[in-house]
């Protein structure tokens, strides 16, 4: 593969295909997620779905085709999405009376049904979630990161007042942060988007931003407080305890398959993928070594070891059915595909009662292969995998901090965003954001929730800071 330092984009594009995560679809901008890549999504999905259900939400399914008139009811929403819409105008051999939009997001159609299902304050909060595919016509597609069709989860909720809706908005952001840190081992910065970066139709948009290994930012998930904007458009109202009709406050929030791209770019290296154990389709691969009779004996012992490892709740694969491939080929392949732990097992190892364990990355400097007693290996692996998961999170956190600068001068700003992130004061004016983007390709990624309160002048125009703290700027995917 092309080295990251030579061309990070080429490295990524080559790796996602070679590692058998994804292939290009027949329509420009679409993708075929292969089983290895889809298993990563399933693991993300299962954990997030558990969190969503435990918080009291119910899964539902809404139509893929949405009447065009629905989108037009919320003016800012339709304006924001118009360039990305795919529209069906003919079906059944004739022109449709009303064009149908292929779902870009579901605030409008779910809003229509919220209005039907909500009558009283007793119907609130209404907590819905949908696992679905969406279509947004992408002009510059990149597999997993920006595709015309992608998979996601979208939460949509209705509440009696702003306070309850904001609690929901922040709950979703915290849930996504948990998935990002605990499963993807990706340290993310949580906070609010600037007005110029808000979701179309939202009152406030919150985001999680992660740093990739080329210093660019990637938006991992978003959560939106929609106020009463969609409630007004779709008449989502309820009778309060005093008998008055009152508009509901709504939220929406989502995480997509771009998280797979985030994992690749947060941890990968020139050898290929580096998968956090909690998201690895195979956490451990056992490779038997030997030819003919010795090979058969090693394979039999590898299968026994694999069964013992599986009994510990570990996702394990025994690579014993490709005798035409050399052990070295298999070692390189599984390294490229990011398996956290490789176990090598030959007759010499078996006779000595040991197995050779190889981590995808050494968690301690100078640590390479190590031999572990066969009988102890299964019970030791959960701890080894947990340590590797923690190591990846800490490694990514250190990388982000090492590549983030606090700046006050424009020259330092332009130098900082060329290779990483900067924390700087900003005036909050959209025209100033546009000037910064045109000159540096950097945008305000997030107003960090946990940043200390500070005041100063805008790094670009020297007007007073609008946010009472520094904003993170960076170039982004």
Image (spheres, rainbow, N blue to C red):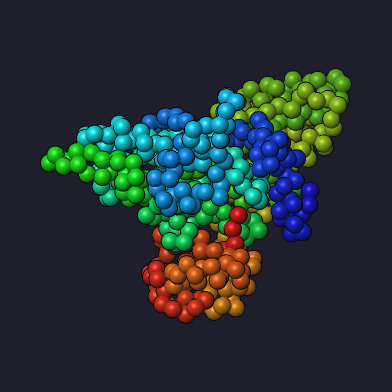
Q: Residue at 61% x, 33% y: name it.
A: 38
Residue closest to the eye, 397 or 4: 4
Q: Is residue 367 left or right of residue 189?
A: right
* Residue 187 vertical placement versus 432 (above, below): above
Q: Is residue 83 left or right of residue 367?
A: left
- Quarter residue 159 falls in: top left
Q: Residue at 51% x, 35% y: name it.
A: 100
Toward the left, the furthest residue is 242
Q: Position of residue 467 (x, y in %)?
A: 39, 68
Q: Residue at 57% x, 60% y: name it.
A: 400
Residue closest to the eye, 241 or 12: 241
Residue 305 visible to an observer of this rendering: yes
Report how many numbered discs are placed on residues in the image. 0
- Quarter residue 20 falls in: top right
* Residue 352 vertical placement versus 363 (above, below): above
Q: Residue at 75% x, 34% y: name it.
A: 344
Q: Position of residue 157 (x, y in %)?
A: 35, 40
Residue 131 visible to an observer of this rendering: no
Q: Position of residue 313 (x, y in %)?
A: 55, 28
For the C terminus, the image quarter is bottom right
Q: Position of residue 260 (x, y in %)?
A: 60, 43
């Amino acid at each position: 593969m092309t080295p990251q330092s030579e061309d990070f984009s080429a490295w990524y594009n080559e790796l996602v295909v070679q590692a058998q995560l994804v292939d290009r679809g027949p329509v420009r901008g679409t993708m075929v997620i292969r089983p290895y890549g889809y298993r990563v999504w399933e693991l993300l999905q299962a954990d997030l779905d558990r969190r969503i259900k435990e918080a009291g939400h119910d899964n539902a399914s809404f139509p893929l085709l949405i009447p065009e008139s629905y989108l037009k009811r919320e003016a800012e929403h339709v304006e924001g999405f118009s360039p990305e819409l795919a529209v069906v105008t003919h079906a059944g051999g004739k022109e449709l009376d009303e064009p149908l939009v292929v779902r870009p997001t579901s605030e409008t159609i779910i809003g229509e049904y919220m209005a039907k299902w909500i009558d009283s304050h007793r119907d609130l909060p209404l907590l819905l979630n949908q696992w679905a595919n969406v279509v947004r016509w992408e002009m510059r597609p990149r597999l997993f990161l920006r595709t015309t069709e992608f998979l996601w989860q979208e939460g949509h909720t209705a509440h009696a007042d702003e306070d309850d809706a904001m609690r929901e908005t922040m709950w979703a952001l915290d849930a996504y942060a948990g998935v990002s840190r605990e499963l993807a081992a990706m340290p993310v910065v949580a906070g609010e988007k600037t007005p110029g970066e808000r979701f179309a139709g939202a009152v406030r948009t919150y985001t999680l931003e992660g740093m990739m290994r080329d210093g660019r930012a990637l938006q991992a998930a978003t959560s939106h407080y929609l106020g009463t904007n969609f409630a007004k458009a779709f008449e989502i109202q309820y009778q309060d305890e005093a008998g008055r009709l009152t508009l509901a406050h709504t939220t929406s929030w989502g995480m997509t398959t771009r998280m797979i791209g985030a994992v690749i770019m947060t941890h990968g290296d020139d050898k290929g993928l580096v998968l956090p154990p909690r998201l690895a389709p195979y956490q451990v691969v056992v490779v038997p070594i030997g030819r003919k009779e010795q090979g058969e004996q090693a394979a039999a012992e590898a299968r026994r070891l694999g069964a013992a490892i599986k009994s510990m709740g570990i996702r394990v694969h025994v690579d014993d059915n490709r005798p035409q491939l050399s052990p070295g080929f298999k070692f390189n392949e599984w390294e490229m595909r990011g398996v956290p732990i490789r176990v090598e097992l030959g007759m010499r190892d078996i006779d000595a009662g040991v197995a050779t364990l190889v981590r995808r990355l050494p968690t301690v400097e100078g640590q390479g292969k190590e031999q572990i007693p066969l009988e102890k290996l299964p019970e030791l692996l959960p701890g080894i995998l947990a340590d590797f998961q923690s190591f990846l999170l800490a490694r990514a956190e250190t990388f982000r901090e090492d590549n983030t600068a606090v700046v006050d001068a424009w020259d330092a700003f332009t130098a900082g965003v060329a290779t990483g992130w900067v924390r700087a004061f900003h005036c909050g004016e959209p025209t100033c954001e546009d000037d910064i983007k045109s000159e540096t390709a950097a945008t305000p990624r997030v107003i960090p929730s946990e940043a200390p309160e500070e005041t100063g002048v805008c790094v670009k125009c020297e007007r007073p800071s609008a946010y009472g703290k520094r904003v993170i700027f960076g170039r982004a995917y």
